[in-house]
Amino acid sequence: MRLIDRYVIREVLGPFVIGLLIFTFILIIPFLIDLAEKFISKGVPPAVVLQIMATLLPQALGLTIPMSLLLGLLVAFGRLSADREFVAMQACGVSLLRLLRPVGVLSFLCWAATSYVLLVAVPNANQSFREITFNIVAARAEGEVRPRVFFEDFPDLVLYVREVPPQGGWNGVFMADSRDNQQPSIYLARHGRVVIDRQQRTVQMVLQDGTRHTADAAGKYEVFRFRDLILTVNPDRVFPRTGPARGEREMSIPELRARAAQIEKEGGSPHNPLMEIHKKFSIPFACLVFGLIGLGLGASNRRDGKLASFVLGVAVIFVYYVLLWLGQAMAKGQLLPAWLAVWLPNIVLGALGGLLFTWRDRAADRPIGFSLPRFASRRSMSVPKLRLPALGILDRYVALSYLRVFALAFVAMAGLFYISTFLDLSDKVFKGTATWSMLARYFWYATPQFVYYIIPLSVLLAALVTIGLLTKNSELIVMKACGISLYRVALPMLCCAVIAGAALFALEETVLGPANRRAEAIRHVMRGGSPQTFDVLDRRWVVGSDGDVYHYIYFDPRERQISGLSVYEFTGEMRELRRRVYASRAMYLGGHEGARPDAWHLEQGWVREFTNGGETKTFTPFAETSLALEPASYFATERPEPQYMSYTQLRGYTNQLRATGFDVVEQQVALARKVSFPFVTLIMTLIAVPFAVTTGRRGAMYGIGVGIVLAIAYWVTISVFAAFGTGGLMAPTLAAWAPNLLFGAGAAYLLLTVRT
């Protein structure tokens, strides 16, 4: 390896590692927010959580290594071109063909790493993930049950508990058992828990100090009081979703070959396992294709080559995976053989990369013919003549530099979110379980959530890069020499951060919740679910405002009618059943003139009242009657999940729960987080400014790397403290604000110690 080879490799490795962190971090953000927080709140040791995260990394690395290689080449050669170092190389006789040697070494290493990940690491990691998560769920199964939320993962059992104490078990248990395919047996118990024995493969529900209510088709009704009761549950159906299913993507090559032979023996088309076999070789080969394209796009004598090549590189990544999935769709339609469908992107982009390399080697001064948006060009740096009071030339210069970097970071990360989501859901379109219009609508409703994630990261990167560039170009020194402090320079960025935080809160208060609900409903259908099994039409168990439990077969929100309605009224904290009402049909009368808002007309049913000892006091069958229940709008309301509610809605729901005596720790944590999270933009800016001053001389990419590390640390801190708050280990308000307090204290220390 000559000096020039080592120099090029060293230049590429920096942005390659940073790109690997960025891409991988974006792909595992859902894990940090959802799975890690749930595991930590259940008392899972941090070492086990990190082990679970490590088992998920290979799936991400199989995609991010080729993408990071292309990014590293584009940024490195773009920097060499922008600083005229590529001109110096050409003047010394170093041709583009000569630079192919270090690029080839890097491409070969990435090919080997990606091959190992897809051939060995992914199947083993997925198997480890399933085993670890099953052990966690088996050891803490009762922790899956949340207070005041109907739990229906146990087969043919519906569980509702008032309280989940920290020491384990449940208090105030309501359970409906419909395993006999008749009227469900109702269990009321003071305390309950679940016991799982993996070695004996037994799952048992243990209830203490309660009663069982059963009714048969002939109208016979029995009340059985028990002190201890054990119900056996089918263990094969208790946890059907412990970890990802072992699909063809996670199989090894021998398993895929066996799967293909089995499908072919059954008379089917084995294109799916055959394509997965070829993908384990074609995706690593993309590293070699991206190496050729990265060198052709990045190496240029033009100063604007860096930015233009980066934008083109993101487009190349998207085109590659679009061709890959389109090829698979054509193979499933019997239009292409399986091997050609998978290798098509490499063939097309490899040919284009070869032509681009040849053309660039002959004419390095010529542009690619790609024009950037005006806001992204350097000519847009000319300061417009804004006529705003107290906004000087310096403020406009810093603000425009900051906004330009913010916009580029926002667009780049949005592209990553869209690409990763497309890769995750596009196969549903090709398999026929979804349509392109459904995918487009999902993107539309998922965009607010993407923006909610992207804005804090963009603010952080914009502050780091802007101050870093001002430091590297000695502009900050000139400003200080003119008597302008670092605090004054950072003022426009702080104002932008406050605006970004306000945008986050406004997004949270307006469109985020409804958009998340619509996006999740579409995703539910795309993954094979029925529209009737999501949200309102599947809420066959509902708790009324006064603690009554409603069960029904079907609710028609347009006609405001309920079929198969059962109402359970309790005494005290669900200790005894006071009254039970059944009606084959119920029609809402609240909209008619003179009727009460809670009036319902019931047909073909009965009313049974009980004494304090559980005995039947009165039994009244009826053909028609009227009864005061919850209004029809109550059954049509959406499920009150914090991620689907605004701050105002969640506050009202929390106050309502607190007034009825429920434990609202989880809701209080979520409520406080809705207020604390928008301040992340201000905290990230305050901590980015001193960091960028100390690292600015090392370049913008170093600042981006620092920013990604800070973002990862912040997200992990949010998840950890939120889990502490949900688990009752910390006050809800403190748990929500602790990340801001910790990082804010660090920012204050750095701001007070940095040279201003």
Image: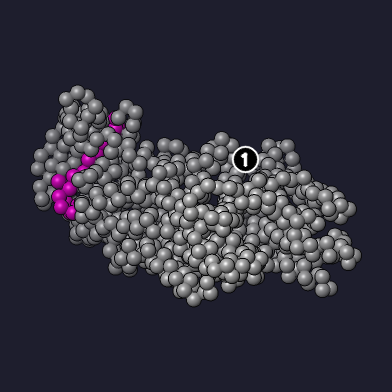
Quadrant including the N terminus: bottom right
Residue drawn at x 24%, y 35% as measured from the top left: 631
- Residue 210 image offset from top left, x and y in percent: 20, 56
- Residue 171 image offset from top left, x and y in percent: 24, 59
Q: Which residue is mark 1?
A: 430
In the picture, measured across the screen, residue 404 lies left or right of residue 649, that is right
Residue drawn at x 13%, y 34% as measured from the top left: 620
Q: Is residue 604 above or below residue 457?
A: above
Question: Magenta span: helix, strand or loop, mainly?
Answer: strand
Question: Quadrant of residue 297 in the image?
Answer: bottom right
**Is 672 in front, or is 622?**
672
Q: Is residue 75 visible?
A: yes
Magenta stretch: residue 565 in it?
yes
Q: Secondary structure at mark 1?
A: helix
Q: Is residue 413 visible?
A: no
Which amino acid type is shown beneath numbered disc 1?
Phe
In the picture, measured across the screen, residue 290 lies left or right of residue 169, that is right
Residue furthest to the top in view is 593
Residue drawn at x 32%, y 39% as measured from the top left: 637
**Is 665 in front, or is 78?**
78
The range drawn in magenta is 561-578
Tally the marks. 1
- Residue 445 image offset from top left, x and y in percent: 49, 42
Give neighbour class at mark 1: few <14, some 14-19, many 20+ (Cα, 10 Å): some
- Residue 151 image offset from top left, x and y in percent: 34, 51
Question: Quadrant of residue 325 in the image?
Answer: top right
